[in-house]
Amino acid sequence: MARTLIKNGTVISPTGRHDFDVLIEGETILALLERGKSDSLSITADKVIDAKGKYVIPGGIDVHTHMELPFGGTAAVDTFETGTIAAAWGGVTTIVDMALQRYGENVHEGLAEWHRKAGGNCAVDYAFHQIIGGVDEQSLKDMTYLVDHEGVTSFKLFMAYPGVFYSDDGQILRAMQTASENGATIMMHAENGIAIDVLVQQHIARGDTDPKYHSYSRPSLLEGEATNRAIVLSKVAGNVPLYIVHMSASEALNALAEARHEGLNVFGETCPQYLYMTLEDHLARPGFEGAKFVCSPPIRSKHDKHDHHGDLWKGLRMNELAIVSTDHCPFCYKDQKELGIGNFSKIPNGMGGVEHRMELIYQGVVQGELSLERWVETCSTTPARMFGMYPQKGVIAPGSDADILVWDPNKKTKIGINDKHHMNMDHSSWEGTVIDGKVDTVLSRGMVVIENDKYTGRKGHGKFIKRGLCQYLN
Ligand code: DUC
Ligand code: ZN
Ligand code: ZN
């Protein structure tokens, strides 16, 4: 089996930094060797990667993506092929995408369709959560089958999007009760969709149709309320593991923190757009440009009574928030975002970001928001543990998959449609952003997929990862 040696780098894990060389054999990590030992032991390798002055970290894991999702009268534009190539460019070696079951559809067929879309097409490894858009007797049974036989152990429910993906409180409680029996994790899109729909209609009726009204019609209070309700329901169901996705608001974070202090099995993620973007600077851009930044929950105002950005960064530091994902759901501006000209509620909700999460959260390290260790923890190690992939993924240790990102802190990355951009959208949500660091080399199960600013991977190299239960319970 081919051997690769990553020499002279600093290995970063959630618990510290060490000058280790990493020896890889085939697809897995064989050994970590103290600096100098690979020479004194005369270790030979087919390929040597010099990581002097660079960080060597476990490949990024993005646990929230939507490749090819049919949504908002159109479909997300990244295929599993383009989306996982972009992931590789961003130092991400595993994605967990959301397979879809809608009301009236069969869960097994929804999952099979996702396998058809992804199978043989991915550049890096992939796994699935299952969206349950129609909770009923059959889908509840199917949830248990997926946990027991398919390696799909987490289910996303929606308190938003009535008539599309929405579940009412009774359905949510029943799904949580099922999860408390089969060990699954419930993932929640926590926004009060019924109240939001009223506000949306009122804005449109008043002629407030620009993209910024998307945010005004989805106030942070309604994210806080739904988060609290989801937590209460999970408690009623017997402290079932509950993971609140894409958190954007201080009110929601406060509810989560309180529940965590109580010892409940509730966890949260946020996404880079909620840490950096504002209603004023993005959604409210002149003309229709703000449509590029329409996602749900929405980008918040910098003039709110809460400092959402500051609170979310603090939440990440304090482990109130466990994970950063992207909610990668890319739409082109032309013909897709444009569906909402004259009516913001018709703008497909979503942004593309799978390529830039490692970069944007590293910038948080540069700005003093997080430690290097916490960068690795929130973007790789905890995602693996939260979703049952550890220690195969999320750690640089003997026996683990050789999914590795070599990061150069001395170079810069300019993000933009004509700079670094490999996603399928016709624009970049992060146009003009400059990062103080750069993806240098990326290995996916031992295969070098990014090197010397070139993609060297292969379609179909990425394998489906069957997941176990959450390994992160309190
Ligand atoms: N939010 C988005 O912005 N896009 C996809 C689905 C979601 O919940
Ligand atoms: Zn969502
Ligand atoms: Zn999502």
Image (cartoon, rainbow, N blue to C red):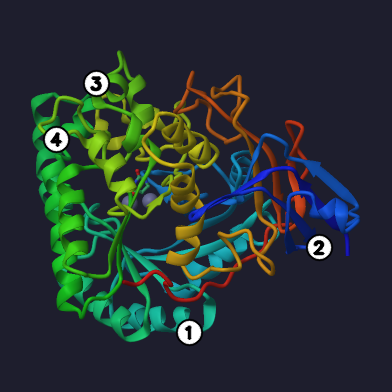
Q: Quadrant of residue 336?
A: top left
Precedes in sequence: disc 3 or disc 2: 2
Upstream in sequence: badge 1 or badge 2:
2
Q: Are marks 4 and 2 in contact (CB under 8 Å)?
A: no
* Residue 148 numbered mark, or none: 1
Mark 4 — residue? 306
Give the foreground label among 1 and 2.
2
Viewer-closest of 81 and 8 = 8
Q: Measuring from the top left, give residue 217's x and y in whole percent.
A: 15, 37
Q: Position of residue 119 (x, y in %)?
A: 65, 62
Q: Earlier in the sequence, mark 3 or mark 4?
A: 3
Mark pair 4, 2: CA separation: 50 Å
Q: Are marks 3 and 4 in contact (CB under 8 Å)?
A: no
Q: Earlier in the sequence, mark 4 or mark 2?
A: 2
From the top left corner, tell me how far across and down residue 230 is, in percent. Answer: 18, 64
Amino acid type at mark 4: His
Residue found at x 16% / y 51%: 254
Which residue is the site of mark 3? 280
Q: Which disc is residue 25 wearing?
A: 2
